[in-house]
Amino acid sequence: LQLDLTLAGFPVSLYDTAGLRTKTNDPIEEEGIRRAHDALLHAHLICYILDASCMHHEHPFHILHQENKNTELIFIANKCDLLPNDNPNLILQRGRAYIQDTFPSSPFFQNATWISTIATEQDGIDHLLTFLESYVQRRFSHSSNEPPAIVRQRHQRHVLACLDHLNQAIRDFPYAPELGAEGLRLAAFELGRVVGIIDVEDVLDSLFSTFCIGK
């Protein structure tokens, strides 16, 4: 499953990968495992969800290991409301200690982040989203306040077409203002395909309210 959304102003794709088993005789499940591994290889952030009420169960943590230094790992301990003593911090400490002891020479695991949540409560979901937003801002924001990169090919095509129409409009305006206006209309159309429909007539009325075109 894939969900595209916006976090902290950045386009983000979330992938729900079912199952990380090493072997299976089911060809459909095998394809799901292959896709899960492919998603892991290309992920910026891997979120591994654990059941906080049974953290002692075995987990295929070794499958998560990534040599890519740009990939980060976060363990999410869910169902913290089912803990006997209602103390998620203790569970997180034990989980962190186990991972660090099991993978002592792996910076990927040693630097993993641990958080607790309750998926059935809105506060728990808000806490997780807040963490993800802060991660995205830290990871992709620049000190120069540069906007996020345009990563989708469709968006890139429309933005490049918009720039072409604007450049043509700049060249046309001194000699043929009506052609320059058409270039602006086309540029606005391309931009609207990226950010949503805009009223081109309002844009043109605002731009050319102080002079007449075609005389």
Image: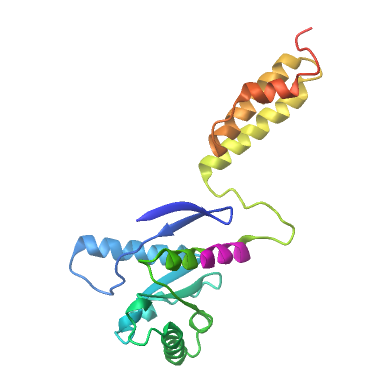
At horizontal 62% and vertical 53% (from top left) the residue drawn is 148
Labels in figure, total:
0
Please say whether residue 193 is one of the residues in the magenta stretch: no
23 shown above or below 178: below
Residue 38 locus on image (x, y percent) = 39, 63
Residue 191 locus on image (x, y percent) = 60, 34
Q: In the rendered image, which quarter is residue 139 located in?
A: bottom right
Residue 166 or residue 200, whichever sits in front:
200
At horizontal 75% and vertical 19% (from top left) the residue drawn is 208
- Secondary structure mainly formed by the magenta segment: helix
Residue 144 locus on image (x, y percent) = 74, 58
Seen in the image, is 169 located left or right of residue 98? right
196 shown above or below 77: above
Residue 48 or residue 179, whichever sits in front:
48
Seen in the image, is 90 located left or right of residue 107? left
For the N terminus, give its image quadrant: bottom left
Residue 128 locus on image (x, y percent) = 47, 67
Residue 131 or residue 110, whichever sits in front:
131
Q: In the rendered image, which quarter is residue 166 located in?
A: top right
Residue 93 or residue 156, whichever sits in front:
93
Q: Residue furthest bottom?
A: 101
Q: Residue furthest top?
A: 215
At horizontal 73% and vertical 62% (from top left) the residue drawn is 143
For the C terminus, give its image quadrant: top right
Residue numbers of the magenta segment: 130-139
Please say which color scheme the image uses: rainbow
